[in-house]
């Protein structure tokens, strides 16, 4: 019985963690390898979001920007990764990208090899939508030129 309750507690904590994103959020991957694999399969650009639960500005973006009605039409145009820098693998990746402050977002092409743009601060939904549109244009241009 104790073992069953323990397993139930673990499952509940996993569910709570997975539902940590507000309704209307994009589908977030939580590791770089998983988002890059998806990008290679579907050919969509990648958004790497370096964040942390204790970061107030990061939580503002998470709760107010990514799920906003202005951003929702752009959700399916990207592969989104929400990377907690407190996790060792993500921390090492953040070092590789020279992340000094969070939130810090990197926009990569579908290969994950070319950085199309980045964003180092909180931005309003309308401004973020403009950034995403610009990144899509850069991704399309890079794809056409073979880069």
Image (spheres, rainbow, N blue to C red):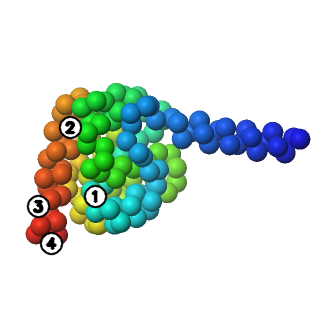
Q: Earlier in the sequence, mark 2 or mark 4?
A: 2
Helix, strand or loop at mark 4:
loop
Q: Nearer the viewer, mark 4 or mark 1?
A: 1
- Which quadrant of the figure has residue 4? top right
**Contact between labelled residues 4 and 2, with CB atoms less than 8 Å apart:** no
Left or right placement of residue 93 versus residue 133 in this view: right
Identify the residue position indicated by label 1 in the image.
44
Image quadrant containing the N terminus:
top right
Residue 116 picture location, percent across and down? 20, 56
Q: Position of 96 compared to 135: left or right?
A: right
Identify the secondary structure beneath mark 2.
helix
Cβ atoms under marks 1 and 2 closer than 8 Å = no
| Crowd rating for badge 3 (residues with CA inside 10 Å; few <14, some 14–19, many 20+) | few
Mark 2 lies on residue: 129
Separation (CA) of disc 2 from disc 4: 26 Å
Label 1 crowding class (10 Å Cα cut-off): few <14, some 14-19, many 20+?
many
Residue 104, compared with residue 69, is above or below; it is below
Residue topped by disc 4: 146
CB-based contact (under 8 Å), mark 2 and mark 3: no
Is residue 24 placed above or below 82 in the rendered structure?
above
Callout 1 secondary element: loop
Q: Do the residues labelled 4 and 1 touch (CB within 8 Å)?
A: no
């Amino acid at each position: 019985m104790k073992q069953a309750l323990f397993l139930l507690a673990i499952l509940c904590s996993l569910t709570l963690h997975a539902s940590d994103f507000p309704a209307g959020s994009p589908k977030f991957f939580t590791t770089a390898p998983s988002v890059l694999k998806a990008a290679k399969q579907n050919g969509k650009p990648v958004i790497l979001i370096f964040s942390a639960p204790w970061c107030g500005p990061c939580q503002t973006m998470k709760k107010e920007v990514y799920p906003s009605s202005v951003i929702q039409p752009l959700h399916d145009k990207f592969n989104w990764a929400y990377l907690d820098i407190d996790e060792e693998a993500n921390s090492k990746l953040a070092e590789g990208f020279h992340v000094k402050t969070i939130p810090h977002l990197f926009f990569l092409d579908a290969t994950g090899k070319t950085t199309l743009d980045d964003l180092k601060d909180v931005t309003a939904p309308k401004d973020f939508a403009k950034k995403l549109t610009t990144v899509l244009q850069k991704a399309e241009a890079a794809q056409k030129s073979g880069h």
